[in-house]
Amino acid sequence: MTTLKLTENEKNFLKQCINYDDRESQKNDNYCCAGLEEAAAIFGGNLNAGKGLLSSMTQKGIGDMDDEGYDIFWINEDRIDALYDALGLE
């Protein structure tokens, strides 16, 4: 299993992305309830810092921003186990 190294800011954002208590349910629906606004809030509303955070997670292969104009971050299904492990979730 791949170990996912996350910054505290990434962890804080990604905790908002978890919609389910278990991995299998999350794998069936990789939709995330967070986007740029939530990422920016971690930095006191700084949109540029929020964009940097999202860019970093995209580069790590964690997920991508929606490409159809919605402000949501999609978690890559193949990274969900590593994400749950990194966040200390069951």
Image: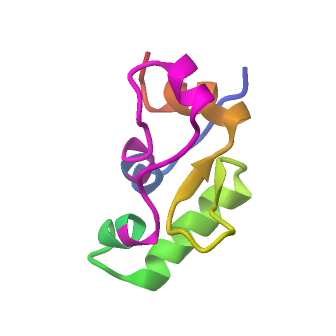
What's the residue at 56%, 18% (across, down)? 24
Viewer-proximal residue, 74 or 40?
A: 74
Q: For the view shown, which residue lies furthest in the left direction?
A: 44
Residue 33 drawn at (x, y percent) = 42, 51
Q: Is residue 1 above or below residue 38?
A: above
Residue 25 drawn at (x, y percent) = 52, 22
Which image quadrant: the N terminus?
Answer: top right
Question: Quarter of the image holding residue 31?
Answer: top right
Q: Which coloring applies here?
A: rainbow
Residue 36 lies within the magenta run: yes
Q: Is residue 22 above or below residue 83?
A: above
In the figure, is residue 67 to the left or right of 88? Answer: right
Residue 30 lies within the magenta run: yes
Q: Is residue 72 above or below residue 24?
A: below
Which image quadrant: the C terminus?
Answer: top left
Which portion, as a residue range, is magenta? 13-37
What's the residue at 65%, 51% (across, down)? 63
Residue 81 drawn at (x, y percent) = 61, 24
Viewer-proximal residue, 35 or 60?
A: 35
Q: Is residue 26 above or below residue 24?
A: below
The tally of labels here is 0
In the figure, is residue 40 to the left or right of 31? Answer: left
Residue 82 drawn at (x, y percent) = 62, 29
What's the residue at 66%, 30% (across, down)? 3
In the figure, is residue 28 to the left or right of 40? Answer: right
What's the residue at 53%, 29% (across, down)? 26
